[in-house]
Image (tube, rainbow, N blue to C red):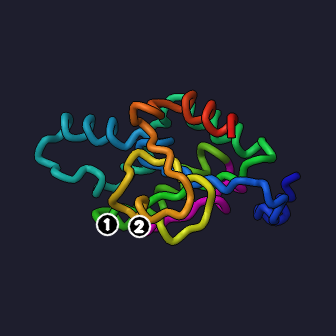
Amino acid sequence: MIDMKNGLAEKRLNSVQVIYIDMDDTIADFRGAHQRAIKANPKVIFPQSRYGFFEGLKPIEHAIKRVKALLADERFDPYVLTAPSIRNPLSYTEKRIWIEQKFGLEFCNRLTISPHKNLLKGGFLIGDFDQGKGQEGFEGELIHFGSARFPDWLSVMEYLLSR
């Protein structure tokens, strides 16, 4: 059972699996927004450096529904773990706003922004890269979203629910 006092999940049974979910290209379509921005204005080399880029990302298909399903399942304790954009210091705020818009204010307590994903402890890390931000040193299991084994949220959920 989850006790959401003050928006923080208290420690539950030892069998609960902490799951970290990357934001960009795992639940939010960074790549699509980047490509559209380059097409619209080819002179802007780093569109992610512009105000509003991260706040305006569209969700990946089924991502919001699946993350909410993990939250509702007592076997899992999901968090969003995202790296900031060094090209846009506003990315910290915009990512936080995006999470609130998609999941509600209480879920913002489940947001961690860090370029070092290996520093956190958990059972699973779901992300679109298998290295580069500490994923290769994460103590739990990496679920490589977008790979042949885990091409979409359906395959991720089937795997997690079978564990």
The amino acid type of the residue labelled 1 equals Ile
The quarter of the picture where residue 112 lies is bottom right
Disc number placed over residue 45 in the picture, else none: none
User: Mark 2 packing: few (<14 Cα in 10 Å), some, or many (20+)?
Assistant: some
Mark 2 — residue?
115
Residue 3 in picture, x, y percent from top left:
86, 58
The amino acid type of the residue labelled 2 equals Pro
Residue 47 in picture, x, y percent from top left:
25, 50
Disc number placed over residue 86 in the picture, else none: 1
Q: Say if 151 sits above or below 116 in the image.
A: above
Q: Are marks 1 and 2 in contact (CB under 8 Å)?
A: yes
Image quadrant occupied by the C terminus: top right
Foreground: 140 or 83? 140
What residue occupies the far bottom of the structure in this picture? 119
For image coordinates 41% across by 39% down, the residue present is: 29
For image coordinates 20% across by 35% down, the residue present is: 40
Residue 22 in picture, x, y percent from top left:
49, 51
Disc 1 element: loop
Left or right, 5 with reference to 77: right
Residue 37 in picture, x, y percent from top left:
25, 40
Disc 2 element: loop
Q: Say if 81 sits above or below 67 in the image.
A: below
The quarter of the picture where residue 109 lies is bottom right
Magenta residues? 104-116
Left or right, 13 with reference to 162: right
Q: Say if 64 sits above or below 142 in the image.
A: above
Alpha carbons under labels 1 and 2: distance apart:
10 Å
For image coordinates 62% across by 61% down, the residue present is: 122
Give whichever of discs 1 and 2 has the lower sequence position: 1
